[in-house]
Image (tube, grey):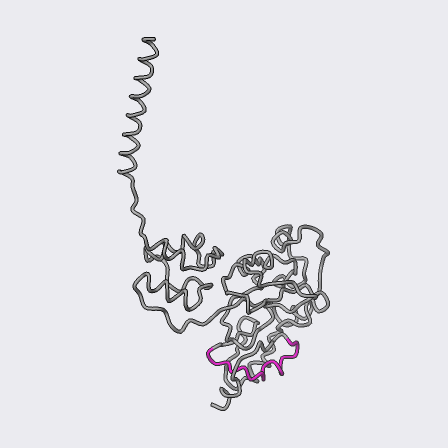
Amino acid sequence: MHIAMVSALVMGGLGVLFAVGLAYAAQLFRVDADPRVELLASALPGANCGGCGFSGCQGFAEALVKEEAPLNACRVCGHEALAQVSSILGKETPVGITRQVARVMCGGNRESARWLARYEGAEDCRAAVAVGSSPKGCSRGCLGLGSCVKACPFGAIQLGADSLPVVNEDKCTGCGVCAKACPQGVVAVMDIDLPVLVRCNSHDRGRAVRDVCQVGCIACKACEKACVQGAIRVVDNLAVVDAARCTGCGLCTEKCPTGCLATVGMPKVGEKLLA
C-alpha cells in the first residue's frame, strides 16, 4: 500500500511538472496570429491553385499580411474579392488589371504535324518527354496527352477532336497551373484582350519547321510586312505580337502562308481602326 501511494505521488508530481513546463514553453514560443489572415483567407476564392506562387490561399493570405506578395498576385480574384482584400489590408484597390487566360500556342495536330515515333505509355505529356526526346517531329509542339487538362483546377481545358487542348475562356482564370504542367511550354497565359494568337512554339528555321509541320511559323515575315500598326515582329524565327499596338484588323492572319496566326476576337475593332 505504501509503495502504491509513493508511486501515485511521484507520477502526479511528474505530471504537474510536465504541465508547468509545457505551459511555459507554449508561452515562450507563442506566435500571435494576425486576425487579418483569416479574414483574407475567407475573402480569397479558396481555389488553392497555387497560381500566386504560394501554398494555397492561406499561404497567400499570410504573405499579404507580411507584405511579401502584391495584391494582384491572385489571378483568380474578381474585382469584388480584390476590393475586399484591399479593404482588409487598408490599401487602395489596384486598377487597370487586365484579365488573363491560358491559350494554346500550337496548331499541329496529327494530320498537319509529323510524328517520328509512336508513343505507348502513360497518358501524360511529362511522361512522354521523360522517356527521351519528343515523339513529335517538332520538339516544341503539343503532344496532346492532356497534362494541362488534368492539371486545371477549374475544368477550363479539354482535349478537342484533333487531340489539341481547347481552353474555355469563360471558365479560365489565368492561374497558370496548366502552363506549369506543360513540359513543352505550349500553354501560355496572356491578356484576354490580345486579339491575335501565334499558334506555334518553335524557334527553328523555316525549312526545319516545314519538314515537321504544315501549320508552323516559318519566319517568312509576311505578317510583319502586312501589319500597318507595326504590331508584329519576327523574333528568333517566331512571330511575336505587341498587344499595345495590335488592333485585331486581321491583315497578318490573311497574309500568313501557313495559317499559324489566328484572330481570337476583339470587341470594337472597327472603332479602334476608325480612331
The residue positioned farthest toward the bottom in the image shown: 274
Q: Is residue 240 left or right of residue 33?
A: right
Image coordinates of residue 207 in percent, x first then y, are 66, 71
From the top left corner, tell me how far across and down residue 166 is, in percent: 62, 66
Q: Residue furthest front?
A: 1
245 inside magenta stretch: yes
Is there any visible trace of residue 203 in the rendered image?
Answer: no
Residue 206 position by quadrant: bottom right
At 41% from the left and 64% from the top, the residue drawn is 81
Which residue is at the front of the view, 245 or 60? 60
Q: Is residue 239 left or right of residue 122?
A: left
Q: Quadrant of residue 142?
A: bottom right
- Give the quarter of the image for residue 67: bottom left
The residue nearer to you, when weighing 221 against 67, is 67
Q: Main secondary structure of the magenta part?
A: loop
Identify which residue is drawn at 57% across, 72% down: 237
Quick check: is 265 in the magenta stretch? no
Viewer-closest of 128 and 32 = 32
Q: Quadrant of the N terminus?
A: top left
In the figure, 40 relative to 30: above or below?
below
* Residue stretch rendered in magenta on the structure: 244-259
Residue 73 image point, x, y percent:
41, 62
Residue 11 visible within the image: yes
Q: Is residue 8 left or right of residue 196?
A: left
What is the tally of numbered marks visible in this picture?
A: 0
User: Residue visible at 50% across and 65% down?
Assistant: 174
